[in-house]
Amino acid sequence: MNSRPASTLTLLARLGFDDLGAARSTIDALDATPGSGGITEHLELFALAADPDRALRGLQSLLDRHAEALAPALDDADWMRRIIRVLGASEGLGHFLLRRPAELDALRQPLPHPQNAAAYRDDLVAAVSDLTGEDARTALRVRYRRHVLQLAAWDLDHDDPLTAMPAVGRALADMAGASLEAGLAIARRECGFPADQVAATRLAIIGMGKCGAAELNYLSDVDVIYAVEAGEGIETGRAVEIGTRLASMTARSIQEAGIEPPLWEVDANLRPEGKDGALVRSLESHRAYYERWAKNWEFQALLKARPIAGDPEVGAGFLAITQPLVWDSSQRDGFVEQVQGMRERVTAHIPADEVDVQVKLGPGGLRDIEFTVQLLQLVHGAHDDRVRQRDSLGALAALAECGYIGRAEAAEFSGDYRLLRVIEHRLQLDRLSRTHLMPRDPDRQRVIARATGLAATADELLAQWQRTKLAVRSLHEKLFYRPLLSAVAKLPDEQLALTSDQAEARLAAIGFADPQRALQHIAALTGGVSRRAAIQRTLLPVILQWLADGADPDHGLLSFRRLSDALGETYWFLRMLRDSSGAAQRLSTVLAASHFVGGLFERIPEGAAWLEDDDELRPRPLSTLLDEVRATVARHAGDDEAAATALRVARRRETLRIALAAMVDVIDVQELGVALSDITTAYLTGAVSLAHTADDGVEFAVIAMGRYGGAELGFGSDADVIYVFRDTGAGDRAATVAQRIVTRLGQLTEDIRLPFELDAGLRPEGRNGPIVRSLESYRAYYERWSLTWEAQALLRARPAAGDGDLCADFMALADAVRYPVSFGESEAREVRRIKARVESERLPQAADPARHLKLGRGSLSDVEWFVQLLQLQHAHTHPGLQTPSTLAALDAAASAGLVAASDAERLRAAWLLASRVRSAAMLWTGRTADVLPADRIQLDAIARLLAYPPKSAARLEEDYLRTTRLARQVFEKGFYAT
């Protein structure tokens, strides 16, 4: 043996040894040990060890202390392979072999596969047969660890540890049950009660948690509940007394200190009333507790319950009592919220210095997956027994098969779960300790990495683990918190039976005006065997409830059906409905709240995808819109009608985006005004580029006026504009060419689906004047004949589309008119006279002045005229007033001391509320409305869109009337007294 060549450091490094000098010295010493057979011929096997240095040290210790036990293995390469693998991965099992060298024989032959529960039970019970006291406990623990040793060797030697993981967890749970059975057998012999009474005490041990689910760890507490029944010749009270003694003694055989160290802790704290409750109860006592006093979390725990030892009939009786209650528990008030809160409390209680190394409890850890799966089971298992699985992987498969979770998500969850469990197993195998913490020491991390068989280095394992945590956390947030679960869990049973005789009555009761038609929509959505139909059947009860919470559930359901029909089997739509946090509820809410949005969705169903991501709902910048317009016109060069059609589609699409953003509070009313104005500008820019060509002999521009000029458009607002041209070669035909451009603009922008009206009523001479003028004509008019109201109209003028130089020259002309050097009292009186005339003549005869949103007292008109009078008087000396925006000018006036801050705030509040109500009325009905409705149903619908709670019609009305009344007081004091 000494003639073998010495091991080289290069070879040892290649095999994975870290301390090369110590390793070579140890190998040389082992080779020189008389009768040892040497170790050099097995060197290549150390490449398989998680920690070759530790494996070598373990072999040295065995040879030093138990050479005779190890000697036979040195002549058997397969046997040595298993020994080296175990010693390299588990210091704890190495210590066991040093204590019990005879158990090396357990590794002589490979384990073909883990044994079943009956085989483990029979073997452990036989190991303690006729034994009592310390001998019995030692025999039980040694036999258990022998099986763990064999299982670990099988696990470490498996080609695919991820595939092997479920079998390992199941075998460990079966071993735990077998150990409890053996411990119970010892207890029956030692408890001190009469043998006949002990025999009549029918005690069952119910496995909970991972043991009950048959997915146990290498070293974990075993959660149990004890149930007892009295057999023939014994009273229940006596059976409970004896059962309590038996339970205590069973646990001591496993967890009390002894010659052979304890196996694990038997934890009975999940029993009724926890640590304060009786250790053992009769079945009837369990029934009374769970039916009357149990908390929601206790039912979640019972999901995993499984008899693992003791009397099987009593165990079955326990399940018969508790399982129906488990699956009914999701109907309890606040069930889902309490379960979610419990998960958050678990995460919050992790010490700060452990969060980033927690494999089980940390964000993206095992508990995230387990809680997600259990919540899905408890909610959907109430009505579908196919998902009532104890183990996490089985439950995932069932949830996917039944359409409650996507197949892709199930596959990802399953892979992530297996990976995390393998890491957890290797962490616990390392020292046979109950830990879920990734070590921070790089050397120990490297050992864990090699032990998993999934990574060769610590860095590789950590990178893989971090990717997994991120993926798990992302999926958890999508699925665990999705509001679908809370809503389903609160639905009474009959609400899921959408085809029952009571369906119409139920639909009517929750707010559907035409339940028969609603049932037709439901039948169309859920009929057939497609995956879409399966998902709709799952989600529709929830969506119906969300729709019923809206102002018009019937229209919402109709819109939802049309949207579903348009999108069909589109993957992203089905996934969004099922998985996206809040998106399905958002969709249901907007469909039941807005006829305007429902109509747009019919043409642009893909817009539903934006509800998943607030960034997708945010208004696109004007520069981006203009880039798209230019690309569209270029793409359809030579085909104006096709280009105009594409521009219309883009305008509808962006209007839908803004409507959704406004309804889900991504933007406020001021951002809404800017966004709608930008969409209008982009639309006009495209139309002008089609109607006005470079060789038509004129420059042409569109000037925005009114609310469009102020970037204050609402839904349904007309676009106030004036048109200007300048001759660049057309000569006498210039006016005709410009008129033709204006006519063509009207044709190109006409849209039946989303009406678009260009209103040139603010041009000089109003509707009596020419619709388009040359720049020089404007100049001459303003110099000679301009009226005060026309200067006032120019206050909100700004360039919109057309030739830039012409726009700039027009704005220079407008500035001279709208910001006069002086504005006397006579001009101010004229403004006041016209305002009074507008109030008396333009307000519809039957309209209530207090309720008219545009012309009523304290409404938009009052605020705008108040601000515009200040601009005419002071903009020349206060440049901050030189803005087309009403609110910006109001702020500037307050900053300049022209209006008190409190008065400015009252005016601002009225302007904002009137603008919001006006847009909300359009969203609700799909029609422009300028009057606050008196009908309570209509008013309630508008109130909901303004984020008031349901049934707030009176509250909105009071708020509006009060706000505008206060604004009117400011207006009358400041406008007429100025």
Image (spheres, rainbow, N blue to C red):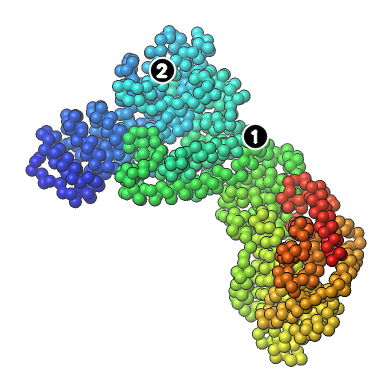
The answer to whether 600 is drawn above or below residue 441 in the figure is below
The answer to whether 266 is drawn above or below residue 623 in the figure is above
Identity of the amino acid at label 2?
Answer: Met
Circle count: 2
How dense is the environment of label 1, judged by Cα within 10 Å: few (below 14), some, or many (20 and up)? few
The residue that mark 2 highlights is 249
The residue that mark 1 highlights is 333
Camera-side residue of 809 and 765 = 809
Instruction: Specify the quadrant of the image occupied by residue 335.
Output: top right
Residue at x 60% of width, y 77% of height: 634
Identity of the amino acid at label 1?
Answer: Asp
Residue 206 falls left or right of residue 112: right
Can you say which quadrant of the picture contains the N terminus? Answer: top left
Q: Position of residue 771 (x, y in %)?
A: 80, 79
Q: Position of residue 397 (x, y in %)?
A: 49, 42
Residue 564 falls left or right of residue 735: left
